[in-house]
Amino acid sequence: MKKEITLNVNGNVYRGEVDTHQTLSNVLRENLNLTGTKEGCGVGECGACTVIVEGRSINSCLVLAVDMDEREISTIEGLASKPGEIHDIQKAFMDQGAIQCGFCSPGMMMSTKALLDQEPNPTDTEIKKGLSGNLCRCTGYTKIFEAVKSLKAEEVK
Amino acid sequence: MEVSMKTDSLQKAYKDFDFIKPNSLEEISEILAKEKGRAQIAAGCTDIIPSLRKKLISPEKMVSIKGIPGLSYVEQDEDVVRIGATTTMTDLIESDLIRENFPALLKAAENVGSRHIQNSATVVGNLCNASPAADTAPPLLVYRAALKIMNQGKEREVELRNFFLGPRKTVLVPGDIVTEIILPFPNENSKSLFIKHGKRKALEISIVSVAVNLSFDENGKITEAHISCGSVGPTPILAEKTATKLVGLKVQGDEDLAFILEAISSEISPIDDVRSTGEYRRYVTCVLTKRAILACCGKGDY
Ligand code: FES
Ligand code: FES
C-alpha cells in the first residue's frame, strides 16, 4: 500500500509516495538514491544502516519509512558540510587506517557522530558502548577505536 | 531544496499492510476495536520488523503509537513511578528516578541490544513481545510492576507476574493496549541487582539473566525477597519458592546459600537451543542467583 510522506534528509525535503512495508534504509537507498547508508543484516544486528534521527542514532533497517514522516534524518552523505569536502570524522578514520572494505564505515561514522555530539570527551568505555551496535566484518576495531579517540575534544585542541 | 522521490520500490519481503498513525489513545482504541486482532500495535519496531521479515506476523494494519503525544514519560506519582507506553530504553537510562531507585532495571535497559536499539526500543514493547529472554522482564518482576491496560476506553490493571502465558503469549486480548507500567518504589532498606549472561557484551540475547531484590531489617536479616530469571523457561520466571527460603536469613557467605541449586532448579525449566544447553543454563542460573544475593547482602562482587 502506498502512502505519501515527507522526509527531511540532511536538510533536503523529499516528498513522495513510499510503500508502507519499506524500511527507512530501503527508501534512502532505492527511492532517494542515497546509497551511502548500507544494509547488512536488515534485523538490527550490524549497524551498517546507522542514521541519526533528531540527535539519536538508530538502525534505519528497523524503522518503517512511513513512520518517519516529517522527521529529520542525517545520513553519511550529510556529514561533510560541502560537496568535495570531508568531515573531521571521515578524516580521522582515513588517517588512522580505520577503513578496510568500507562497508561498515558509514554506520561507524554516524555512530561516532551521535556519540561525540552527546559527549565530546567520551571515556574508552563510552566509546565502546557508543559503537556497540556496529560490527566490522573486516574486524578493524582497534583502528576504528583509535580514530574515535583521536576525535575527542581534548585531543583535537 | 525540495526533491521528489522515485516511487518504485524493492520487491516486498512480506504481505502488504495498511499503516495508521492515530493521534490519541481514544483513536487507537477505536481502531483496535474495529479491527479485532487484524491490527498490530507498533512502537519502537525493533522486534516487529525482524518478525515481519521472518513472516512470524502478517498484520493487515500497522498502528503506530510512536507519534502520540504524552505517551513517553518516566514520572513519580506519590509512591509509584509510572512509565509510559512509548518510553524507550534510552529514556529509562537517562531518567534520574530510575538511576536512583531501580538499579536492576537500569542495568537491564543498558544491556538491551545496542545503543541504536535502545534509542528505538520501548520498555512496554519489550514486555508485550513476551520473549522469555526479554531483558527488562526480570527486574520489573522483582520490583513487583503492574501494567495498565486499556480496551475500548475501559482500564484494568494486571500484575506483571500474571501477564506472561508462554513464549510470545500474554494475557492481552484483541483490542487491548498497554498504556503504562506502574512501578512501586522498593522498600527503604533494600538492594537490587540484575546480571545478564551472554556470549558477548552487546547485541546479545541472554543465555540466562537474573534479577534479585532483597529487603533487610536493621540487623541485616532478609525480610522480603524477590528473584526472577530470564531465558530459563517459557516465560520470564518469578522464583517465589526460592525467594521465600531467603526470608529470615542473615547471609554471611556462599555456605549459607547451598540450598539455591536445588531450590532454583525446581522452579525453572531451561531447554537446549542455539544459544546454550539446558544443563548449562541450570547451573549458571544457580551461580548468578547466588552471586546476586551475595552482592545484595554486601558479601561479594558479581
Ligand atoms: S542492516 Fe540495519 S543493523 Fe544490520
Ligand atoms: S571495514 Fe570492512 S566491514 Fe568494516
Image: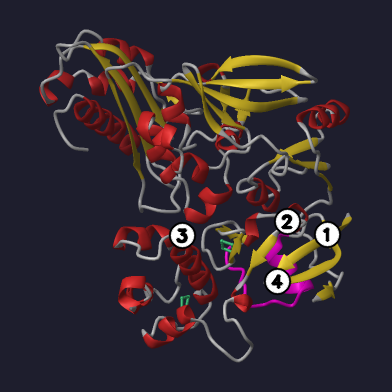
Give the alpha-carbon distance from disc 3 to disc 1, as whole Å: 29 Å
Local secondary structure at mark 4: loop
Label of residue B65 in the image? none
Residue B63 versus residue B263 in the image, above or below: below
- Is disc 1 in the same subunit as disc 2? yes
Q: Mark 3 belongs to which amino acid?
A: Gln
- Is disc 3 in the same subunit as disc 4? yes
Residue B57 vs residue A145: left or right?
A: right
Earlier sequence position, callout 4 versus callout 1: 1
Q: Which residue is mark 2?
A: A68
Q: Mark 1 belongs to which amino acid?
A: Ile
Give the alpha-carbon distance from disc 3 to disc 4, as whole Å: 20 Å
Output the chain of dot 1. A
Output the chain of dot 3. A
* Residues at discs 1 and 2 in contact (Cβ within 8 Å): yes
- Is disc 3 in the same subunit as disc 2? yes
Q: Which residue is mark 4?
A: A11
**Closer to the camera: disc 3 or disc 2?**
3
Earlier sequence position, callout 4 versus callout 2: 4
